Amino acid sequence: QVQLVESGGGLVQAGGSLRLSCTASGSIISINAMGWYRQGPGKQRELVADITSNGSTQYADSVKGRFTIARDNAKNTLYLQMSSLKPEDTAVYYCNAIGVTYGGTYYRRTRDYWGQGTQVTVSS
């Protein structure tokens, strides 16, 4: 009943920029926190940045000062502006929504969701 769809990935040269988007759709009532994770080749999935419903953010040390996370609560959309990209930023980037409450008149549920991932490749 709820889907997260990412977009905006691609191939970029080192030093370039990309903007990722993630839109949650379905019978959504509210979303607690949202975040971006990434998984590079041969690596574990790691947190890149996350943001609470009231706008509090946190970033991985490796992206501080280069990446900016933002969300539009009215559109249930999450963004990640990535600048000064480095080859080590190459990874599949995943959108995560925590505490998604959805439902209708007769039921209401809360769970977490993941997007399908979008590839970001930074060439040197």
Image: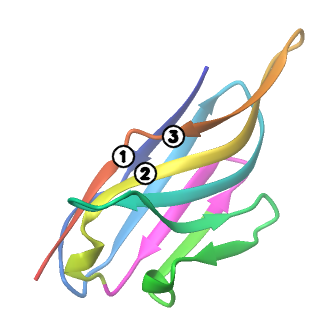
| Image mark for residue 42 | none
The residue located at (54%, 44%) in the rendering is 23
Q: Look at label 1 and name its amino acid.
A: Gly
- The magenta segment: 71-84
Q: Look at label 2 and name its amino acid.
A: Tyr
Q: Position of residue 21 (x, y in %)?
A: 46, 55
User: Does residue 115 sit above or below 88 in this rendering?
Assistant: above
| Residue that label 3 marks | 114
Is 31 on the left or on the right of 86, as rendered? right
User: Does residue 17 sit above or below 91 in this rendering?
Assistant: below
Q: Look at label 3 and name its amino acid.
A: Trp
* Contact? badges 2 and 1 (CB < 8 Å): yes
Q: Is residue 24 magenta?
A: no
User: Does residue 79 sit above or below 89 in this rendering?
Assistant: above
Is 67 on the left or on the right of 49, as rendered? left
The residue located at (22%, 59%) in the rendering is 42
Give whichever of 60, 121 is nearer the camera: 60
Q: Position of residue 24 (x, y in %)?
A: 58, 39
User: Does residue 58 sit above or below 77 in this rendering?
Assistant: below
The residue located at (70%, 32%) in the rendering is 111
| Residue that label 1 marks | 117
| Residue that label 2 marks | 94
Say what secondary structure mark 2 lies in. strand
Disc 2/disc 1 C-alpha distance (Å): 4 Å
Q: Which quadrant does the C terminus fall into?
A: bottom left
- Tell me which label, 3 or 2, sits earlier in the chain: 2
- Quarter assignment of residue 109: top right
- Tell me which label, 2 or 1, sits earlier in the chain: 2
Say what secondary structure mark 1 lies in. loop
Can residue 8 be seen here?
Answer: no
Crowding near the residue tagged with mark 3, few <14, some 14–19, many ≥20 C-alpha atoms within 10 Å: many
